[in-house]
Image: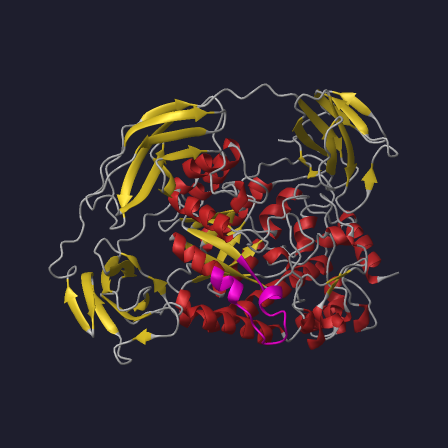
Amino acid sequence: MSLGKRLLKKGSSLLLSLTLLMSVVLGLSTGTTNAAVGTDFRVSVMGPLTQVTDWTSFRNQLQTLKSNGVYAITTDVWWGIVESAGDNQFDWSYYKTYADAVRAAGLKWVPIMSTHQCGGNVGDNCNFPLPSWLWSKGTADEMQFKDEAGFVNKEAISPFWSGISAQYNELYASFAQNFASYKDIIAKIYLSGGPAGELRFPSYNAAAGWSYPSRGKFEVYTDTAKQAFRSAMISKYGSLSGVNSAWGLSLTSQSQINPPSDGDAFYTGGGYATNYGKDFLTWYQSVLQKHLGVIATAAHNQFDSVFGVRIGSKISGVHWQMSSPTMPHSAEQAAGYYDYNSLIQTFKDNNLDLTFTCLEMFDAGSAPNYSMPSTLVNNVSSIANAKGVRINGENALVASGSSAFQKIEEKITTYNYSGFTLLRLNNIVNSDGSATSDMALFKQYVISHSAQDDTHNSVTVYYKKGYATPFIHYRPAGGTWTAAPGVRMQDSEVSGYAKITIDIGSATQLEACFNDGNGNWDSNNSKNYFFNVGTSTYMGGGVITSGPPAGITPDTTAPSVPTGLTSTGKTDTTVSLSWTASTDNTGGSGLAGYDVYRNGNLVKSGVTAASYTDTGLSPATSYSYTVRAKDIAGNVSAGSSAISVTTNTAPATNKVTVYYKKGFTTPFIHYRPAGGTWTAVPGVRMQDSEVSGYAKITIDIGTATQLEACFNDGNGNWDSNNARNYFFNAGTWTYSGGGVITAGAPVVSSLAA
C-alpha cells in the first residue's frame, strides 16, 4: 500500500470540525479591532494589463483619475517586456513613457515588478510570457511547477530554483538605476510573488483542467520539490525512524516520503488531519514564506536607498471550498495557505505591506462553492491588524453598483486599511476620459476616505528666452534629478519669458539647469543654478533675481467670469453646454481655456472652445454645471452661474436576458439581433449570475423581435445547435444545455447570497 493511501486510511477517523480548523489550524479570528481607515489611506487604480497604444486617450483617463481624487495608478512592469532580448539586456523605454504620462497628470505611480506571465488566469487579456532565455538558466525540474496530475506550469519561476535571487537582484537593480529620476512620483513598489502576481502556487489554472469551484492541485511533484520535502522531514525528525514514529508508519526508504498521491482522497479520507498531513501542509506553505524572504531581501537591497518607499506583496483571496464539510479549506491549502498567522508574520519579518483581495464580495457558503470571501477578508485583516502589518485592499472581480462599493467601505474602515486599489482603470473611466457611472460610487464610498496631501514648497521660475523652446532639468536640492532633458517650459504671461512652477516637497531650494531639448545646455559651467522657494527670474548669463521679471508687472488678473451658460442639447446620457467666451486683461491672447464642473467636481480641464458635451451620464438624472475660465498665467476666474440640467429618460429598449447553465466554465455568447450583424468571434463573455452554476447576460436587440445566438468557451469549442443556432424572444430565458430553452429565470432551491 502506498504512503498516501496508508496515511489516508489511518487518518479517516481524525476529521477535524470546520470550527476547529478555522480557529486553530488557520489561526483565524472574527473580531474587529478598528473603526477607521489608516491615517495615510490612499486610493489607487490598476492600469491596463496590456501596453498602452493610444497615449492621448490614456492621458485623458489619467486626468480624470486625478480630478476625482485618485492618488496613484498601479502598473504591471512585465519582465517579459523589459528583458526579452536577452539576459541583462534591458529596455525600459515603454515604462519611461508611461511614467512621464503619470507625472504629467499629477498622479503618483505604483509599479509592480511583474515576474510572472500575463495570460492564462482570470481576467488576463494579454500574452506576455516570461523571457524565453530564462529557461536555459536551469533545468525544467528545478524551474517549473508540476502538479499531482503531472501538468507542468511555467507561468512563474518555481521557488525551488536556486537562481531566483540573482535574477531578481539584476532586474530590481536595473529598475532602480533607470527610474531613480522618477522618485518624485513612485509612491510604493509591489513585488510579484508568483502566478497572477500573488504569493501562491499555480494551483488553479484553466489550462491544467481546473474550473471553479474545484480545489485545484498541489504543485510539488518535480523531483526537486519532492527531495526538498524529504530533506525537510528528515531534518525535522532527525532520521527516517523519527519520521515513522511521528507518522505511525514503517517506511523503509526516504524515497517513500512523498506529497499526497491523491489530493482529493487526502481530504475526504482525513489525511490532512494526521501528523503527516499537518507536516506536509506546513512545509508546503513554508516554501512560499521562504520565497517571499528571498524576493523581499533583493527588493530592499536595490530599492530602499534609491526610492525610500514602502514595498508590498499580495496574497490571493482563495475563498471557495472554505466551508466544505468534506474538503474544508482545500482550495486555500492547494494554493499554499495553511496557517495565515505564520504567513502574515513573514510579511512583518520582511518589512512588507500586505495586499489582500475580495473586499467587494459576499459570503455564499452553500454547495457546491462553499464560498466565504467576506469571512476570509475579516480573518486575514484581523491577523494583520493584530501583528501591526500594513494592509491594502483590492476587489477580485469587477466592482459595480452601490452594494459592492459599500462592502469595500465596510472592510477598509473596519480594519484600518492603509490603501485600496481598484481593478481596473476601464471600469471607472471610459477610453475618451469620461467617467463611468461607477466613478461616483467609488468616490462616495472609497476615495472620500483618502488622506489629504501634505503642504509642499513650490518654486516658480521665469526664464528669459535664451532658447526658443526651453527645458528645465531639475531636482529638489539634494534629491533626484528629472530624466534629461527635463520638462518643457511653457510661455508665460510676460512676453519673451517662459515659466514653470515646481513642487519641491520639503526641500528649501530647487537645483536646475536649462537646455533646448537638443543637447545644448546652460548649466552654469556645470555648477547649476539654485532657486529659493517663491518666485525668481533667470535673466540669462547666470543672473537670477528675486520675484517676477524686473520692470514688468506679471498678470495676476483672472479672466472674466463666463456668462450665459446654457444647455444646447441633451440625451439620456449626455448634456451639451455653451457659454459666452471670457475675456482676459491681456486682450484675449492670454486666455488658456475653461474648466467644466459637474455637481462641484471637475469633469474636464482645458476646454478651448466655449462649449462642451458631457458624456457617460445616467438617464433621468439632474446635474448642476458651472464653468471657470483660466489664463496662461494660471489665474482662474470665479465660477459661472450654475445651471441644472436633467437628462432625458432612457428610450424604451427591447431586451433579451439569457441564463446559461454552465456547460462551459467561462462561457461566451456569439449573437446578433435576428437578421442583423453578428458580434466579433468569440462574442461576449457571460458573467456569473446570482444563481449558482449559471452565467447571465442582458442584450438590447433594438427593433428586432429575436436574438440569434450560439455559445462557446472562448477557445474554439462551440455549442451552436448543430449549426442552426438558438433563438430567444424578448424577455428572460434559461438555456439548460442540450438544446433546452425555457421561459424565465432558472428554478433552483436557493440563490447565492
Q: Position of residue 210 (x, y in %)?
A: 75, 49
* Residue ID at (67%, 53%): 333
Q: Nearer the viewer, residue 615 or 26?
A: 615
Span shown in magenta: 76-97
Q: Nearer the viewer, residue 588 or 554?
A: 588
Colour pattern: secondary structure
Horizontal side of residue 426 vs 533, given as left or right: right
Q: Position of residue 695 (x, y in %)?
A: 70, 34
Residue 436 placement (x, y as % from top left): 50, 36
Tell me if 579 is positioned left or right of 186 in this view: left
Q: Is residue 1 above or below residue 706?
A: below
Residue at position x 36%, y 66% in the image: 486
Establish if 192 lies above or below 253: above
**If the image is split into quadrants, where does the N terminus sit?**
bottom right
Seen in the picture, residue 59 relative to 279 is either above or below; the reply is above
Residue under the image location 79 percent in, 25 percent down: 727
Quadrant in which residue 553 is drawn: bottom left
Frontmost residue, 4 versus 344: 344
Q: Is residue 84 magenta?
A: yes
Residue 225 forms part of the magenta stretch: no
Left or right: 448, with 455 as reference point:
right
Horizontal side of 441 relative to 679 (left or right) equals left
Residue 157: tell me if it is visible.
Answer: yes
Report x, y in % for residue 746: 73, 25
Quarter of the rendering occupied by the C terminus: top right
